[in-house]
Image (cartoon, rainbow, N blue to C red):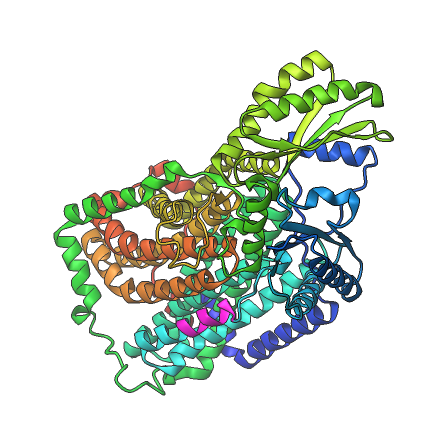
Amino acid sequence: MRRIALFCYGHRWFILLGWIAFLVALFVLSTGIGSNFRTEFKLPDSESANALDLLKARGVPERGGFTGQIVFNAEQGVNDPAVRRTMEDFFAKVAAAVDGEQINSPYDPANAHQISPDGKTAYAEINLSHRNQAQFMDDSKHVKAILKTIDQPGLRIELGGDIFVDQADFSSESVGIVAAVIILLIAFGSLLAVGLPIMTALFGIGCGASLIALFTHVMTVPDFTTQIAAMIAIGVGIDYALIVVTRYRESMHQGMEPRPAVALSLNTSGRAVVFAGLTVIISLFGMFLMNMDFVRAVAIGGILAVLMTMLTAITLLPALLGFVGKNIDKFGIPHLRHAHGDRERSFWYRWSRLIQAHPWPALVLSASLLIALALPVFALRLGIGDAGNRPASDTTRRAYDLMSEAFGPGVNLPFLFVVDTPNGAADMPKVQAIANAIQQTPGVASITAPKLLPDAHLSLINAFAASSPQDKATSDLVHRLRNETLPPLKASTGLQVYTSGGPAIIVDFSDFIASRLPLFIGAVLLLSFLLLMTVFHSVVVPLKAVIMNMLSIGASFGAMVAVFQWGFMDSVFGLGKEGPIDAWVPMMLFAILFGLSMDYEVFLLTRIREEYDRTGDNRQAVADGLAATGRVISAAAAIMVCVFGAFILGQGRDIKLVGFGLAFAVLIDATIVRLVLVPSAMELMGKANWWAPSWLVRWLPTIHMEAGSALESEH
């Protein structure tokens, strides 16, 4: 790290121009080629997936692209001549404005089931052919523009489907960066000290986003990947640069010259940045164990973003510090200048001594609070959010509610039963018996008449639950049909029946994620433990880190259950309705959170270890390490909380979930865990913190954290 620092410092023009050229080249390339984000969800091996595979194998045409609804309600009835003329004219205008569409009108005799029993509500299905995300957004704007021209008394029209979701009028990323600037100004009071972390992070984020856009042409990448990657990169990018800049300022205030100060900063804090970045990358790599394409794509996007921000922090930042030199405190903000060098007068020094004086109360109270916050995790229920969770101000939520009120709560996500009928029409009496049994199953509201596909030798039955798609009763119905209703029928009729459709797909996906989570979590914990053991030559420190990180993540998950699943304070966060936690979110959050929480662990422990190696006094090392890092950890955490919290202001429930989970976890981790629980536990354990079997120490590589080696280059 010292050699890297000195090379970047000595060749700062070359490094700066090289990064500018790299960023511009990636931007031009990604803009010229364009992105090709696609959210293609491939089910794991399951009964619902087998049903869809059977349909494909038998040549049943797959409904491609996107399906949405134009839902309308009229008090005078949808068959009123004026209403019918208006709606048919609307369908025609949509067909003319949107390329490649298909509209299944409820006025077509074959689609009479799309009119409610009371005749006051109906819906048309709009099926768009495959296209990229930008084209979908354009089509959505065209349809909404046409809708605004309709003004007929008594007629209400809403649009259902993901592409019609109202989009936020602001950028969450921009809100997060503005908040970061304000926090840095308050914490450090110098425009240069603020500008360096922001500039470094922006370089990393820009390169990462361009690489992700290019990566969309190599494999299928979901459209929310850039948002999640940006969320991570903004937080860690600013934090990584901040920890190095802070150490550089300390060195300058101690009278060092810029060149050795840069070497010292990168050889100490820079090492912490590298190991912190590696923990995030290891956690994200753990997502590969989930064995799902879209999960791997999101993980790669996050890894690219973290890797770029880490590289800018250890190469571009030393070059920029070379330009700044002794002017790091120049352009200070009036009334925001902070005194440096007198650590014993700081709040964090006094706080470290307070924790040191009362370690048992600090340990018991902080651990009890974390356990209490984590208790709701035991009520966690996995599922998939839908339009029913959106605010009532969104047209897709209103369309969802109209459909539920007119056709029943299960209409928004029907079951699909695929029956293998090798004898064609001769098997239809048996199929009808299966349909009757499904109809009589408690929890089923209605079914459609079985439909024979003679060329495919298959029959299809649609069924609608009496409960909404997100209700636990609907998940229970999937299991009841598979375990109780259908097995006897399969045996008596000799026909193979597959339960699929929306509710079954959600159950299969959730069960698959739940079954893979222990392997994923275990692998991440083991790899992180080994990494920390290698760095600190201790068995106790990494074990303690793993336990405490699990506590902070558990607290975050518990808060997420309380808000999103139970509806506690849901209106504050702009949620429309409580519901299950999206099945992929705990897996995604664990990977990100474990990596980020390890960031603060590494930042704190490397400084404690540095003090311990220098003095050999664990008590003094813990207190001085906390005093030295308390302010930067708090500022870094405040930045991350604001960056992640800004995404709660977005429209998508899944992004709100991720933003809330990350923000809450970082808040808990950087306050209760890092500043109370860790120092109190380390104080109580004393020198045992650094214990490891002698035979193990001999096999571990030696990685020095002490500051002295940074100065060797000067002699």
Over which residues does the magenta segment extend?
170-179
The residue that appears at 36% across and 80% down in the rendered structure is: 257
Measuring 37% from the left and 85% from the top, which residue is drawn there? 327
Is 22 above or below relative to 691? Answer: below
Can the viewer see residue 696 in this picture? yes
Q: Identify the residue at image location x=34%, y=48%.
A: 552
Q: Locate residue 3, reporting x and y percent.
A: 48, 67
Question: Which picture quadrant has residue 103?
Answer: bottom right
Query: Image check: 37 left or right of 186?
Result: right
Is 142 displayed left or right of 603 in the figure? right
**Residue 679 in picture, x, y percent from top left:** 24, 52
Q: Residue furthest left?
A: 357
Residue 536 vs residue 416, the one in the foreground:
416
In the rendered image of this protein, does residue 156 appear above or below residue 454?
Answer: below
The picture places residue 626, in percent across and down from the top left corner, at 25, 59
Q: Quadrant of the C terminus?
A: bottom left
Q: Position of residue 446 (x, y in %)?
A: 62, 32
The residue most toward the right is 455
Relative to the observer, which residue lies in front, 707 or 128? Answer: 128
Q: Is residue 67 visible?
A: no
Tally of marks: 0
* Observer-nearest of 435 and 288: 435
Asked if residue 471 is positioned above or below residue 594 in the image, the reply reads: above
